[in-house]
Image: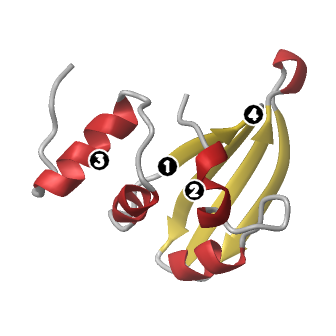
């Protein structure tokens, strides 16, 4: 696998863990989000995908993979990453509050 250089050892290490589907810390997750890159994580059979649609729109795509079929459940758009992190809820909780349940495979 080719190693990428993102200009920072902290970012390089976080991406290395992320791309090898290892658990990253919440702080590493925030660092990777600050690069405006699309990130994907899972809780059970539900896939959560953070996408920067434009300069003013950050979206959370939620997809269910139940019964080996992909079903788009929801797309929620926010004006900024801070809004998404503060307002998007999974089972009534922020991403940070359920971090121990998140996987990257």
**Residue behind mark 2:** 50
Q: Which percent across, then down, holds residue 11?
A: 22, 54
Q: Mark 1 to mark 3: distance in Å?
A: 12 Å
Residue depicted at x 75% and y 49%: 62
Give the position of the N terminus as an image quadrant.
top left
66 relative to 57, above or below: above
Q: Mark 4 to mark 1: distance in Å?
A: 17 Å
Q: Mark 2 to mark 1: distance in Å?
A: 5 Å
Helix, strand or loop status at disc 3: helix
Is 88 left or right of 99, judged from the image as shown? right
Residue depicted at x 66% and y 77%: 78
Please report whichever mark, 2 or 1, sits nearer to the chain's N-terminal start: 1
**Residue behind mark 4:** 44
- Crowd class of label 2 (few under 14; some 14 to 19; many from 20; radius 10 Å): many
Helix, strand or loop status at disc 4: loop
Q: Which mark is residue 14?
A: 3
**Residue behind mark 1:** 39
User: Are circles 2 and 1 on residues that touch, CB within 8 Å?
Assistant: yes
93 relative to 1, above or below: below
Mark 4 or 1: the one toward you: 4
User: Are circles 3 and 2 on residues that touch, CB within 8 Å?
Assistant: no
Please report whichever mark, 2 or 4, sits nearer to the chain's N-terminal start: 4
Q: Which percent across, then down, holds residue 102?
A: 61, 44
Please report whichever mark, 4 or 3, sits nearer to the chain's N-terminal start: 3
């Amino acid at each position: 696998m080719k190693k990428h250089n993102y200009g920072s050892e902290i970012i390089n290490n976080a991406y290395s863990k992320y791309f090898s589907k290892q658990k990253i810390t919440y702080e590493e997750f925030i660092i990777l989000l600050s690069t405006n890159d699309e990130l994907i994580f899972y809780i059970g059979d539900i896939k959560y995908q953070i996408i920067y649609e434009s300069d003013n729109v950050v979206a959370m795509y939620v997809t269910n993979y139940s019964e080996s079929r992909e079903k788009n459940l929801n797309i929620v758009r926010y004006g900024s990453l801070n809004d998404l992190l503060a307002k998007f809820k999974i089972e009534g909780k922020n991403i940070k509050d359920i971090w121990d349940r998140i996987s990257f495979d």
